[in-house]
Image (cartoon, helix red, strand yellow):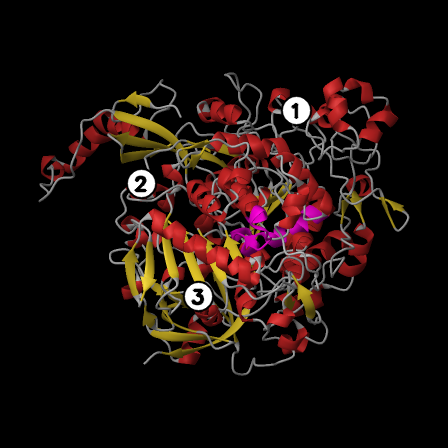
Amino acid sequence: MRLTPKHATPKAGAGLGISRRQFLKRSGATTGGLAAAGLMGAPMMRRVDAAERTPYSDAPVETRRTICSHCSVGCGVYAEVQEGVWTGQEPAFDHPINRGAHCAKGASLRQHGHSSRRLKYPMKLVGGEWQRLSWEEAIDEIGDRVLALTEEHGPDSIYWLGSAKFSNEQAYLMRKFAALAGTNNTDHQARICHSTTVAGVANTWGYGAMTNSLNDIQNSRSILFIGSNPSEAHPVAMQHILLAKERSQAQIIVVDPRFTRTAAKADHYVRLRPGSDVAFIWGLLWHIFENGWEDREYIRQRVYAMDEVRAEVANFPPAEVERITGVPEAQMRDTAQRLAENRPGCVVWCMGGTQHTTGNNNTRAYCILELALGNIGVSGGGANIFRGHDNVQGATDLGLMSHSLPGYYGLAEGAWAHWARVWDLDLDWLKSRFDQAEYTDGQPMYSNGITVSRWIDGVLEEEEAISQRTRLKAMFYWGHAVNSQTRGPEMQRAMQQLEMMVIVDPYPTVAGVMHGRSDGVYLLPAATQFETTGSVTATNRSIQWRDRVIEPLFESKPDHEIMYLLARKLGFAEELFKHIRVEGSEPVIEDITREFNRGMWTVGYTGQSPERLKAHQQNWHTFSFRTLRAEGGPADGDYYGLPWPCWGTAEMNHPGTPILYDTSKPVSEGGLTFRARFGIEHNGENILADGVFSRDSDLNDGYPEFTDQMLRDLGWWNELTAEERAEAEGKNWKTDLSGGIQRVAIAHECAPFGNAKARCNVWTFPDPIPRHREPLYTSRRDLVADYPTWDDVASHYRLPTLYKSIQDNDNSDRYPIILTSGRLVEYEGGGEETRSMSWLAELQQQMFVEINPALANDLGVADGDMVWVEGAEGGRVRVQALVTPRVAREVVFMPFHFGGIFQGESLHDRYPEGSAPYVLGEAANTATTYGYDTVTQMQETKCTLCRIEKAS
C-alpha cells in the first residue's frame, strides 16, 4: 500500500489530476464567482452563520486509492485520511472508467468510515435480547455448534452463503473454505442476478461475461437496452452511453415494461409485456431474416445452427409476436431496421432479462440476435452485460458457487484433482471431507450444491426428497441481503426451523431481524472493503486493486480474518492456508492472489499478479478513456486492469483482452477467437471456425483446444522448456500449471482454447433452441396451451423443482395484475448499507408501488394512498401508491431495496440498539412467488401476479 502525504486537496501535476474542489475554487474565484457577484450584488453573497460549523482538521492528509463498493462499473475514488480518520473523498478525475464522475451512491462512500449504524461487536440473541460477546466467545460457540451439526447430520447440513461484496481473494478463500469443510452448499448473489447470463452466454460462445467494455460503448452505432436501466442501476456508465450518442450518433433503443429514466434518454422506446423476451427477439429476427439484413458471411464462418434458429423464428410472424408481446408490427420492424442499419451495435441486459424461469432462454436469444448481425468480436458491438454488485463478476469467476470450483472448472473428478494440485493437498484427504453416500444427484462432492435461491426449500422440503443426507440445519449469511430473495413468508418459516443462523456483515441486515426467533442467531461484525485491501473485478472483466483506506472500525474484522478464525476452530486452518502466510490472525491478501493466479488458467486469471495490478492502480492517468490501453508509463501497452483472459504467467506480460472474440488483433495483443468448448463436430457437422482466425495466427482455420498431444502433432512440443515439458505431460491448456502450453500457443498467435463457431443450439439444455414459454404465474391464460412451461423436475441442484403443477393452477381471476420489480438510483442491492447512510436516506424515504392512472382509477386508489399489494402466494406488503404512466395499465412495479417492515409490522425494535437503517420499508420480495430457471435455479422476480387494495 502506498500512502502519499499531501495537502487537503490533490495538487495538479502530482498524478492525481485536478480535483473537483480545485476546479470549483479556481473557476469561482476567477470567472463565475466575479460574474455572479456583479449580477446578484453584494447582499446576495453574504456567508451564512451556522449554529455549529463542521469540525476541521489541519492534520496532514494522506490519499488512498480505492474502488467504489456499490455497482460493478468500477469507479475510482481518492479517499482522504487524516490521523486515521476518513475525512474526505474525490471521484478520481484521472481514472480510465469513471473519469471524475460519481453517482449518489458513490458520493456517499465515506459514511462507511464513520457510520453509527454499523455492527460494533459480536452479538447473540438470547431470550429475544441481543447480548455482547467477545470474538473468542463467538468463534468458540459458533464453531462448537458447526462441529456438532456436522458430526450429527454431515457437512452438507451447513450452508456457507458468501458475497459479491467480497474481494476476489475473499471470494476465492470462501469457496476453498467450503470445499475443505466438505460441502458444495455455498453460493453468492450471482445466482439470483446473472447466473442465467453466465450459463446462457458461456454455452453460446465460451465465456459467460461482458464481451466489450463500458468505454468501448462509445464506438457503438446502436445500443439495445433490454431489461436494463443504467441511469439508475449503473449511473456512471451513462457517460459512455451518451458519448456514443454524441460521437457515433448511436441509436439508443430501450425495451422495457416500464418507461425508465434510461428510456427518457432513448431515441426509441418499446413497451414489452413482462416475460415475453424470446418472442420479442424472434420478432426482430423475423424482420431481419425477411429483409436479408443478417451478416451471412459472418454466420457461415463463425456461427453454428443459425438455420435452426431461422426455422424457429418462422413461427413468430408479426401478428403472433404482437399477440405475445403487445408490440405492433410497425414498431418491431422499425426496431429491427434501426439495429440493422446502425452497425456495429451492442445489446445490454441486466436482471430484467435474467430473473425469469426462462432466463437462460432470454440470454441466449440476445446472443443469437448479435450473432445474426455480426456484432460479436468487434469494437462497438458486443453482449454488454452490466453486472450488479461491485464484485459479482469476480466472485463468480473465483468459483463462489454451488456448481463449480474456481475458474469454472466444475465439480468433476478432474476439477478436484486440478485444485488439489494447486492447493498442494492430498486428493484422498479432500474426498474424505465429504459425505461418501450416493443420492439422487450422485455423491455430494461431485454434485451441484443447493443454490442460494433455494436454501429455503433446503430447510422446508421433505427430507427424503432432498439429494443429500439431511435438510439444512444452519445458515451463514455472509454479506448477503435476504430481502433480495423471493418468497418472504416461507423464508421466515425456514429461518425459524434452522438450528443456528450466523450473520457476518458490517450491518445487521434484514436476516438479523425478520426471523421471528428469540435465540440461536449470531451477528459478527465484518469490516467493509475500505478497511482491507485486495482486488475486485469490474463488469468489463478489468481487475482493480484497492488500498486499505482506514483500519477496521469498532471490533469489526476483515472477512478473510474471520475465515481464518473459523477454520482454526474447525480444525483445517493448516490445510486452508498451507501456502498463504498469516500475520497474527490475518491472512496475507497478496498470497491469496498468487494462489489463484497459479490455478485459474481457464479464464486467464493467471497473468494479473499483485505487482501488475498495483502498478495499474498507481498509474490510472496513463490509460486511455477511449480504449483503456496505457499510453506510455510503466504499464505501456497494457489494457487497464488486465481484463481476463490475461494469458500465461505474469512474466509473459500479456496485456489483457479488452474485447472477447476479436480476430482483428493477434492473441498476444488481446485478440481472440470463439472458444472450442463443445467438441469439434455435432451430428456429423463441423463446429470449428471456417476460414477465420485471429490476426497473424499460424493456424489459418478452425482448431480444437490445445493439449500436450496437439503440440506434438504440430511439431511445437520442443518449444517448451525442459521444466515446462515435465509439467505439461498429459495436460492441456487449462491444467498445465507451468503455463507452457499457453505460452507456446500464443507464440504462434493461437488462442489456447481453440478456434470454433459460436453455437445457437445448446443441445445439453432443456430447450436447445430458445423457446418462448409463459411464466408460471401468467395473466395470459390464452397463451398457456401454445407456450406451456416445462414438466416438474424430480431433482435439480438437489431439490424438486415445480413448473407445470404451478402453471396449471389458474388464479389469474383473483390475482389479475402483473408485478415486476427493479432498482432505484439512491439504493443498492437489499439496501441495508445504503439505507443506513443518512445522505442517501434523505433522498428516498418511502417504499412504493407504481400504478398506472387507469388501473388506479379502477381500484379507487389515489397518488400517495397506502395500499396492500398481495402476491399470488399470499405474501402481502403495505406500501405507498405512486400513480404514474411509467407502467402499463396491467403492470405494477416495486423497487427491491427496502426491508425492516414485514407484512405491515415494523421490525425496528428488533435491531441491536442504534443499528436500524434510517429508512425502513416493506421488501418487495415478500410478495414475489415461486419460479426457478431450468438450468441455474435463477429466481423469478420480474413476472408474477398480484392484487392491490387500498389499506384501511
Q: Nearer the viewer, mark 1 or mark 2?
A: 2
770 in relation to 566, above or below: below
Across and down, in percent, residue 546 comes to 43, 33
Across and down, in percent, residue 308 comes to 81, 55
Badge 3 amino acid: Ala
Query: In whole angstroms, how far apart are the C-alphas of marks 1 and 2?
Result: 38 Å
**Residue that mark 2 sits on:** 110
Instruction: State the residue in front, 785 or 750.
Output: 750
Instruction: State the residue in front, 112 or 229.
Output: 112
Q: Over which residues does the magenta segment extend?
A: 178-203
Secondary structure beneath label 1:
helix
**Residue that mark 1 sits on:** 669
**Residue that mark 3 sits on:** 924
Q: Quadrant of residue 539?
A: top right
Q: Is residue 464 left or right of residue 143?
A: right
Q: Is residue 285 left or right of residue 117?
A: right
Secondary structure beneath label 3:
helix
Query: In whole angstroms, how far apart are the C-alphas of marks 2 and 3?
Result: 28 Å
